[in-house]
Amino acid sequence: MNKKVILMILDGWGITQNPEVSAIFNAKTSYIDSLYNKYPNASLRTDGEFVGLPKGQMGNSEVGHMNLGAGRIVYQNLVKINLAVKNKTLGKEKVLLDAFSYAKKNNKNVHLLGLVSDGGIHSHINHLKALLGVASENNVKNVFLHAFTDGRDCDPKSGKHFIDDIQQHMLKTTGELASITGRYYAMDRDNRWERIKIAY
Protein backbone atom coordinates (compact mmCIF):
# COMPACT_ATOMS: atom_id res chain seq x y z
CA MET A 1 0.00 0.00 0.00
CA ASN A 2 1.38 3.39 -1.01
CA LYS A 3 1.04 5.74 1.96
CA LYS A 4 1.66 9.43 1.50
CA VAL A 5 2.55 12.14 3.99
CA ILE A 6 1.79 15.83 3.57
CA LEU A 7 3.85 18.42 5.42
CA MET A 8 1.74 21.57 5.71
CA ILE A 9 3.04 24.80 7.22
CA LEU A 10 0.36 26.91 8.89
CA ASP A 11 2.29 30.11 9.55
CA GLY A 12 1.12 31.80 12.73
CA TRP A 13 -0.71 28.76 14.06
CA GLY A 14 0.46 28.01 17.56
CA ILE A 15 -0.35 26.46 20.89
CA THR A 16 -0.08 28.82 23.83
CA GLN A 17 0.38 28.14 27.52
CA ASN A 18 -2.48 30.57 28.12
CA PRO A 19 -5.25 29.65 25.66
CA GLU A 20 -7.50 32.44 26.95
CA VAL A 21 -5.39 35.00 25.03
CA SER A 22 -5.15 32.91 21.86
CA ALA A 23 -7.12 33.91 18.77
CA ILE A 24 -6.82 30.32 17.56
CA PHE A 25 -8.24 28.93 20.80
CA ASN A 26 -11.18 31.32 20.57
CA ALA A 27 -11.85 30.67 16.88
CA LYS A 28 -14.08 27.95 15.46
CA THR A 29 -11.59 25.46 14.05
CA SER A 30 -13.73 22.35 13.72
CA TYR A 31 -11.66 20.70 10.98
CA ILE A 32 -8.32 21.15 12.77
CA ASP A 33 -9.97 20.04 16.03
CA SER A 34 -11.16 16.88 14.29
CA LEU A 35 -7.60 16.12 13.19
CA TYR A 36 -6.38 16.45 16.78
CA ASN A 37 -9.13 14.09 17.94
CA LYS A 38 -8.75 11.55 15.17
CA TYR A 39 -4.98 11.23 14.74
CA PRO A 40 -1.93 10.96 17.01
CA ASN A 41 -0.28 14.34 17.50
CA ALA A 42 2.48 16.10 19.38
CA SER A 43 3.64 19.67 19.89
CA LEU A 44 7.04 21.24 19.33
CA ARG A 45 8.66 24.31 20.85
CA THR A 46 9.67 26.82 18.17
CA ASP A 47 11.56 29.37 20.22
CA GLY A 48 14.95 29.87 21.80
CA GLU A 49 17.33 26.97 22.22
CA PHE A 50 14.75 24.55 20.82
CA VAL A 51 15.44 25.90 17.32
CA GLY A 52 19.05 27.05 17.74
CA LEU A 53 18.27 30.62 18.84
CA PRO A 54 19.38 32.30 22.08
CA LYS A 55 17.41 31.34 25.18
CA GLY A 56 14.09 33.20 25.35
CA GLN A 57 14.34 34.46 21.76
CA MET A 58 11.10 34.42 19.79
CA GLY A 59 11.14 32.13 16.77
CA ASN A 60 10.21 33.12 13.22
CA SER A 61 9.10 31.43 10.02
CA GLU A 62 12.61 31.13 8.53
CA VAL A 63 14.03 29.44 11.63
CA GLY A 64 10.98 27.22 12.06
CA HIS A 65 11.02 26.02 8.46
CA MET A 66 14.75 25.29 8.62
CA ASN A 67 14.40 23.16 11.74
CA LEU A 68 11.35 21.32 10.39
CA GLY A 69 13.18 20.50 7.18
CA ALA A 70 16.31 19.32 8.97
CA GLY A 71 14.52 17.30 11.63
CA ARG A 72 17.03 18.44 14.23
CA ILE A 73 18.17 21.62 15.97
CA VAL A 74 19.91 23.93 13.49
CA TYR A 75 22.08 26.43 15.33
CA GLN A 76 21.59 29.86 13.81
CA ASN A 77 24.43 32.20 12.84
CA LEU A 78 23.19 34.51 15.57
CA VAL A 79 24.06 31.93 18.22
CA LYS A 80 27.51 31.35 16.71
CA ILE A 81 28.25 35.09 16.70
CA ASN A 82 26.88 35.45 20.24
CA LEU A 83 29.34 32.78 21.38
CA ALA A 84 32.22 34.57 19.63
CA VAL A 85 31.25 37.79 21.45
CA LYS A 86 30.79 36.03 24.79
CA ASN A 87 34.04 34.06 24.55
CA LYS A 88 35.91 37.09 23.19
CA THR A 89 37.06 35.16 20.11
CA LEU A 90 35.61 37.75 17.73
CA GLY A 91 38.74 39.83 18.28
CA LYS A 92 40.87 36.95 17.01
CA GLU A 93 39.17 36.66 13.63
CA LYS A 94 41.90 37.08 11.01
CA VAL A 95 39.66 38.71 8.40
CA LEU A 96 38.53 41.34 10.89
CA LEU A 97 42.04 42.02 12.19
CA ASP A 98 43.42 42.26 8.64
CA ALA A 99 40.73 44.80 7.71
CA PHE A 100 41.49 46.91 10.79
CA SER A 101 45.24 46.67 10.14
CA TYR A 102 44.80 47.78 6.53
CA ALA A 103 42.65 50.74 7.59
CA LYS A 104 45.24 51.86 10.14
CA LYS A 105 48.25 51.52 7.82
CA ASN A 106 46.56 53.32 4.94
CA ASN A 107 44.61 55.88 6.98
CA LYS A 108 41.31 54.53 5.68
CA ASN A 109 37.86 54.79 7.20
CA VAL A 110 36.07 51.77 8.63
CA HIS A 111 32.31 51.73 8.03
CA LEU A 112 30.12 49.44 10.12
CA LEU A 113 26.56 48.89 8.92
CA GLY A 114 23.97 47.01 10.92
CA LEU A 115 20.80 46.77 12.96
CA VAL A 116 20.85 48.54 16.29
CA SER A 117 18.34 46.48 18.25
CA ASP A 118 18.13 43.43 20.44
CA GLY A 119 15.65 41.81 18.06
CA GLY A 120 18.02 38.90 17.68
CA ILE A 121 16.67 37.60 14.39
CA HIS A 122 19.18 39.04 11.93
CA SER A 123 21.59 40.50 14.46
CA HIS A 124 21.94 41.87 17.97
CA ILE A 125 23.20 45.28 19.10
CA ASN A 126 25.86 43.45 21.12
CA HIS A 127 27.50 42.39 17.85
CA LEU A 128 28.08 46.02 16.86
CA LYS A 129 29.27 46.82 20.38
CA ALA A 130 31.77 43.97 20.18
CA LEU A 131 33.04 45.15 16.78
CA LEU A 132 33.50 48.66 18.16
CA GLY A 133 35.31 47.18 21.14
CA VAL A 134 37.70 45.20 18.93
CA ALA A 135 38.33 48.31 16.82
CA SER A 136 39.15 50.27 19.96
CA GLU A 137 41.49 47.55 21.26
CA ASN A 138 43.34 47.72 17.93
CA ASN A 139 43.53 51.54 18.04
CA VAL A 140 41.38 52.01 14.95
CA LYS A 141 40.27 55.65 14.96
CA ASN A 142 38.28 56.38 11.81
CA VAL A 143 35.24 54.22 12.56
CA PHE A 144 31.81 55.25 11.30
CA LEU A 145 28.55 53.54 12.22
CA HIS A 146 25.63 53.45 9.81
CA ALA A 147 22.76 52.38 12.04
CA PHE A 148 19.68 50.57 10.79
CA THR A 149 16.75 50.96 13.16
CA ASP A 150 14.60 47.88 13.52
CA GLY A 151 10.91 48.19 14.33
CA ARG A 152 10.04 44.76 13.00
CA ASP A 153 11.74 42.32 15.37
CA CYS A 154 11.33 44.68 18.32
CA ASP A 155 9.17 47.63 19.43
CA PRO A 156 8.57 49.93 16.42
CA LYS A 157 9.36 52.96 18.61
CA SER A 158 12.51 51.56 20.23
CA GLY A 159 14.97 53.10 17.76
CA LYS A 160 15.83 56.14 19.89
CA HIS A 161 16.65 53.97 22.89
CA PHE A 162 19.04 51.79 20.88
CA ILE A 163 20.68 54.78 19.17
CA ASP A 164 21.31 56.34 22.60
CA ASP A 165 22.67 53.01 23.83
CA ILE A 166 25.15 52.57 20.97
CA GLN A 167 26.28 56.20 21.22
CA GLN A 168 27.05 55.74 24.91
CA HIS A 169 29.04 52.64 24.01
CA MET A 170 31.02 54.54 21.36
CA LEU A 171 32.04 57.10 23.99
CA LYS A 172 33.78 54.26 25.84
CA THR A 173 35.26 52.58 22.76
CA THR A 174 35.54 54.25 19.36
CA GLY A 175 33.44 55.37 16.43
CA GLU A 176 30.87 57.97 15.59
CA LEU A 177 27.34 57.80 14.26
CA ALA A 178 27.41 58.59 10.54
CA SER A 179 23.85 57.82 9.47
CA ILE A 180 20.53 56.38 10.62
CA THR A 181 18.22 54.50 8.27
CA GLY A 182 15.18 52.34 8.88
CA ARG A 183 15.45 48.69 7.92
CA TYR A 184 12.45 49.18 5.61
CA TYR A 185 14.90 50.90 3.25
CA ALA A 186 18.30 49.47 4.17
CA MET A 187 17.30 45.81 4.41
CA ASP A 188 14.67 45.35 1.72
CA ARG A 189 14.79 41.74 0.53
CA ASP A 190 12.38 41.95 -2.39
CA ASN A 191 14.68 43.62 -4.93
CA ARG A 192 13.06 47.02 -4.51
CA TRP A 193 15.96 49.16 -5.67
CA GLU A 194 13.96 52.35 -5.07
CA ARG A 195 14.21 51.61 -1.32
CA ILE A 196 17.82 50.45 -1.24
CA LYS A 197 18.83 53.46 -3.35
CA ILE A 198 17.56 55.82 -0.65
CA ALA A 199 19.54 53.96 2.02
CA TYR A 200 22.64 53.86 -0.19
Image (tube, helix red, strand yellow):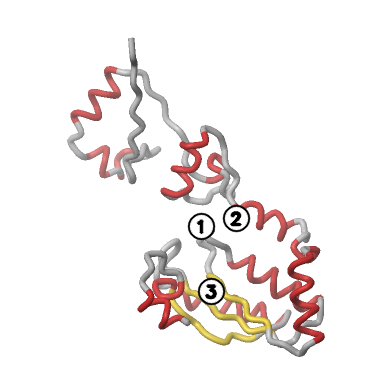
- Please report whichever mark, 1 or 3, sits nearer to the chain's N-terminal start: 1
Would you say the residues marked 1 and 2 are in contact, meaning their CB atoms lie under 8 Å apart? yes
Q: In the image, residue 5 lies at what x, y percent?
A: 35, 24
Q: Residues within 10 Å of mark 1 (few under 14, many from 20)?
A: many
Nearest-to-viewer mark from 2 and 3: 2
Q: Which mark is residue 162?
A: 3
Q: In the rendered structure, find residue 78 and report the number of the disc placed on it.
A: 2
Say whether marks 2 and 3 touch (CB < 8 Å): no
Q: Residue at x 78, y 88 (%)?
A: 106
Kind of residue sitting beneath label 3 = Phe
User: Residue 28 sits in which quadrant?
Assistant: top left
Q: Of the residues shown, which amino acid type is indicated by label 2?
A: Leu
N-term mark: 1 or 2 = 2
The spot of residue 118 in percent (x, y) is 54, 63
The foreground one among 84 and 160 is: 84
Residue at the image point whose x is 41% and y is 48% from the top = 61
Please tell me whether mark 1 or mark 3 is closer to you in this view. 1
Q: Real-space Cα distance between discs 2 and 3?
A: 19 Å
Q: Position of residue 186 (x, y in %)?
A: 45, 74
Residue at mark 1: 121
Residue 113 position within the rendered picture, expressed as x and y whole percent measured from the top left? 57, 75
Q: Secondary structure at mark 3?
A: helix
